[in-house]
Image: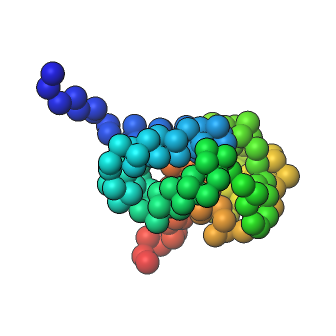
Amino acid sequence: MGRVVLSGAKAVQTAVRREIDRSEASRYDHRLHALLLVASGRSCAEVAQWFGENASTVQRWVQRYRAHGLDGLHESERPGRPRSLDAVQWRRVEADLRKAPRYFGFSTRAWDGPTFAEHLRRCYGVDLGLRQCQRLFRQLGARPRRARGASGSA
């Protein structure tokens, strides 16, 4: 059988990454698959490259497995502030970003950080700063657009 090539490979990678990040169970399965490859003789660096992870992350999963068995691959409590949006809200936000901001009553034609922040505040009761909104854009696979000046000069 010949090599299979997917068209739009980057889009496929982004969609799969989002699916993995969608739930704790998916992330656990992701770690199990990585551990299975390491147990089959693949290096942590090789597995990390295939999985789009950092080699130290895969090494940490192996260490957690050695210390705690399969239970070590489950997610533990994370330090820091809990997520502001649950999985259902994330999917709604993703759908929102596929619509123009004008659909939600904004005067801008394209999403940008300030508009996205205001949308999250209005629709989801979440008050986030500009930098956090930019991080969310990247997580959701969107790109913030900068407003163009009226004169057209930079």
Residue sitting farthest toward the left = 2
Q: Nearer the viewer, residue 89 or 43?
A: 43
Using residue 5 as the reference point, say whether residue 66 is left or right of it. Answer: right
Q: Position of residue 130 (x, y in %)?
A: 67, 68
Q: Is residue 26 visible?
A: yes
Question: Which residue corresponds to the image point at 73% horizontal and 61% vertical from the top-left?
Answer: 78
Question: Which residue corresponds to the image point at 57% horizontal and 48% vertical from the top-left?
Answer: 140
Question: Which quadrant holds the N terminus?
Answer: top left
> What's the coloring here?
rainbow
Question: Which residue corresponds to the image point at 32% horizontal and 48% vertical from the top-left?
Answer: 41
Q: Nearer the viewer, residue 55 or 154?
A: 55
Residue sitting farthest toward the bottom = 154
Residue sitting farthest toward the right = 125
Q: Is residue 108 visible?
A: no
Question: Which residue corresponds to the image point at 76% horizontal and 57% vertical from the top-left?
Answer: 77
Using residue 89 as the reference point, say whether residue 60 is left or right of it. Answer: left
Q: Position of residue 60 (x, y in %)?
A: 53, 62
Tally the marks: 0
Q: Position of residue 3 (x, y in %)?
A: 17, 30
Q: Nearer the viewer, residue 21 or 78?
A: 78
Question: Which quadrant holds the C terminus?
Answer: bottom left
Using residue 127 as the reference point, say whether residue 73 is left or right of it. Answer: left
Q: Position of residue 73 (x, y in %)?
A: 61, 49
